[in-house]
């Protein structure tokens, strides 16, 4: 019994089915939405951020209103309580990372996140760690001194 529960706990994150609402990129990007419609990259540009529930409701006040998932979304929008999306890509807080620096340098979303348009569930298609960051920096002649990515004595 305990073992079975343990397996379930392991299996859930593995298949990425841990999101509070089963949002699908594949379904929504097929409607012609672009990444920037939902991921805004507000100043100063570090974070891409997550979409405002009010934006989702611009469609869902009329679409699929009978779905319990959409009802959960509508309740969150009405209460002004952001949905607590389970993070997929997250690096340690002691590492500097800016989306804007990288998109300005010409890296696409797909370079670092894989074929998001084809995914119902986002999982880590691309691994990011010190080795992979430094490999691309070496290839692109970007800074690779420790202090470029870390504070001193972190
Ligand atoms: C209609 C809104 C919408 C659009 C358009 C959209 N996304 Fe998302 N995105 C979300 C939501 C909601 C989540 C959180 C749920 C999840 O992870 O699936 C998310 C999560 C992500 C994540 C995971 C981030 C993390 O660390 O947890 C990545 C990466 C991502 N989106 C990339 C993209 C890319 C690339 C595009 C364009 C090809 C795109 N998204 C278009 C709504 C959107
Ligand atoms: C050079 C690689 C790289 C590129 C290019 C990139 N990302 Fe990311 N993305 C990351 C990393 C690394 C994280 C985790 C950042 C963290 O935890 O601080 C991340 C996190 C995210 C998140 C979670 C929220 C956040 O900002 O932490 C979203 C959403 C996301 N990316 C969407 C996108 C979209 C959309 C694009 C294209 C416009 C894009 N990313 C381009 C590497 C990249
Ligand atoms: C441009 C309009 C539009 C926007 C904006 C939009 N959606 Fe959707 N969404 C749709 C359509 C169309 C469907 C497919 C409906 C169907 O299956 O008949 C859908 C389906 C869904 C479903 C599946 C519902 C179910 O039970 O089958 C979820 C969950 C969902 N959307 C969540 C979101 C979230 C979260 C956002 C904001 C990040 C969002 N949507 C933004 C149009 C939109
Ligand atoms: C696809 C290749 C690529 C990947 C992957 C990548 N970077 Fe970069 N990064 C660059 C390029 C190119 C620049 C230089 C941009 C410029 O000078 O305008 C850069 C610049 C930076 C800078 C600014 C450095 C400075 O001193 O100006 C930081 C910090 C950084 N990257 C951190 C990271 C981290 C952390 C990761 C891994 C999570 C990462 N990068 C992954 C290509 C990449
Ligand atoms: C291009 C960016 C980049 C550069 C340059 C870089 N690092 Fe890192 N470093 C990272 C990332 C990304 C991680 C892993 C964060 C994570 O796992 O979430 C990391 C993790 C670490 C860790 C923690 C490892 C652990 O988990 O215990 C140490 C220690 C470290 N770096 C030291 C250094 C030193 C020393 C240098 C210079 C030789 C350096 N870093 C240069 C990006 C970088």
Image (cartoon, rainbow, N blue to C red):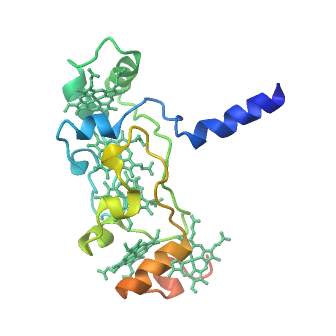
**Vertical placement of residue 99 versus 150, above or below:** above
Give residue 153's position: percent from left, percent from top: 62, 81
- Front-lying residue, 99 or 109: 109
Q: Where is residue 19 in the image (x, y as percent from the top left)?
A: 48, 35
Residue located 39% across and 62% down the image: 112
In which quadrant of the rendered view does residue 21 lie?
top left
Please state if 17 lies on the left or on the right of 102 as rendered.
right
Q: Residue at x 49, y 88 (%)?
A: 145
Quadrant into which the C terminus falls? bottom right
For this view, does 134 lie left or right of residue 52? right
Q: Position of residue 24 (x, y in %)?
A: 36, 35
The answer to which quarter of the image holds residue 45 is bottom left
The vertical placement of 146 against 85, above or below, is below
Ligand 3 visible in quadrant? top left
Give me the residue at 50% from left, 65% from top: 128
Task: Say which residue appears at 46% left-offset and 71% top-offset.
Answer: 96
**Camera-side residue: 149 or 152?**
149
Position above or below: 139 against 49: below
Residue furthest out toward the top: 66
Which residue is at the far right? 2
The number of numbered discs placed on residues in the rendered structure image is: 0
Q: In this view, does 123 lie to the left or right of 106?
A: right
């Amino acid at each position: 019994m305990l073992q079975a529960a343990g397996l379930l706990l392991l299996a859930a994150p593995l298949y990425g089915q841990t999101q509070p609402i089963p949002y699908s990129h594949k379904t929504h990007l097929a409607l012609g939405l672009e990444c920037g419609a939902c991921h805004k990259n507000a100043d100063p540009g570090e974070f891409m951020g997550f979409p405002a529930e009010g934006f989702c409701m611009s469609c869902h006040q009329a679409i699929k209103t009978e779905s319990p998932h959409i009802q959960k979304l509508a309740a969150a929008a009405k209460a002004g309580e952001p949905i607590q999306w389970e993070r997929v890509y997250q690096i340690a807080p002691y590492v500097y990372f800016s989306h804007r620096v990288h998109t300005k340098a010409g890296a696409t979303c797909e370079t670092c996140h894989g074929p998001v348009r084809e995914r119902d569930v986002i999982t880590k298609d691309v691994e990011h760690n010190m080795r992979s960051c430094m490999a691309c920096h070496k290839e692109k002649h970007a800074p690779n001194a420790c202090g470029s990515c870390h504070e001193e004595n972190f």
